[in-house]
Image (cartoon, helix red, strand yellow):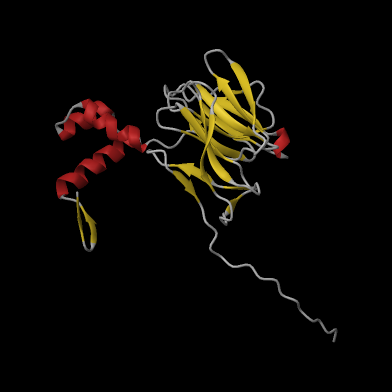
Amino acid sequence: MAESGEGLWMSAKERDRLKVLHEVKERHITQKQAAAELGLSVRWVREPLLRWRAPRVLYQGTCLWRPSWRKDSSAIAFLEAPDVPEKAEIKLVDPKSGQVKALPGSTGLILPAISHDGRYLGSGTADSRELKLYDFSAQTWQEFARPAGVGFAEWSADSHYIYFDNGLSADSGVYRFRIGDHKVEQITSLKNFRRAVWGSLPWFGLTPNGDPLVLRDVGSQEVYALDFEEP
């Protein structure tokens, strides 16, 4: 397959292979028959067919937010908030079995994020007053009060730190919490920085190198007064 200024084009041989694979997909012939017809191994036929499979629905719910994978692919964590944030709950789904269960003690948490090493899950509370960490091995929670507030949380690439901002606080900034000794340090101040709000919070992210990412609101907001005369 090649690309030109006019689009994509395939050779006759590639088109014939695609037709045979389509016949397998429609179950008109077997993978073994397709391999024999194309003069290829069954493995070569199987691999592109796996990529053709339709996505499998693991869970359907209301207001699902921020999916996050464990490193070993044993679970996907996500937030379900069908009502108010205080009633939100973190759930775990097993991609292999499709089994879904609520994470005990996660009611009222928002925007969960699993560490890159798969050991912890971090999240702020709905009232933005605490940062909570869940240890998957010990199956326990730790709570850390943050007077300045907690908004979005993101893990460093080495999983040694969890970074977070403090949302719409008057003294907004970006902080990081060290897992080893629970030390908190401010990375940068966002005071007087006009941020774009995503949902009810301003968005915050992190690059692979650990540099903070924020959205700046460069739009304008004006108030108008209108006179209305009834006909």
Please identify the quadrant where the C terminus is shown: bottom right
The residue lying toward the viewer, choosing from 80 and 159, is: 159
Q: Position of residue 95 (x, y in %)?
A: 48, 25
The answer to which image quadrant residue 82 occupies is top right
Residue sitting at 56 percent across and 29 percent down?
122
In the rendered structure, the answer to whether residue 221 lies left or right of residue 2 reads right
Name the outermost residue toward the right: 230
- Where's residue 28, x and y in %? 32, 34
The outermost residue toward the top is 138
> Is residue 106 shown above or below 26?
above
Q: What is the number of callouts on the image?
A: 0
Q: Is residue 134 left or right of residue 227?
A: left
Q: Is 179 on the left or on the right of 4, as rendered?
A: right
The residue drawn where x is 56% and y is 12% is 138
Residue occupying image coordinates x 28% and y 31%: 47
In the image, farthest residue toward the bottom? 231
Whether residue 59 is visible to the viewer of this picture, yes or no, is no
The answer to whether residue 194 is above or below residue 172 is: below
Name the residue at 25% across, 43% down: 19
- Quadrant of residue 48 within the rendered picture: top left
Q: Nearer the viewer, residue 113 or 49?
A: 113
Coordinates of residue 228 in the picture (x, y in percent):
81, 81
- The answer to whether any part of residue 179 appears in the image is yes
On the image, the x and y values in percent for residue 213 come to: 47, 47
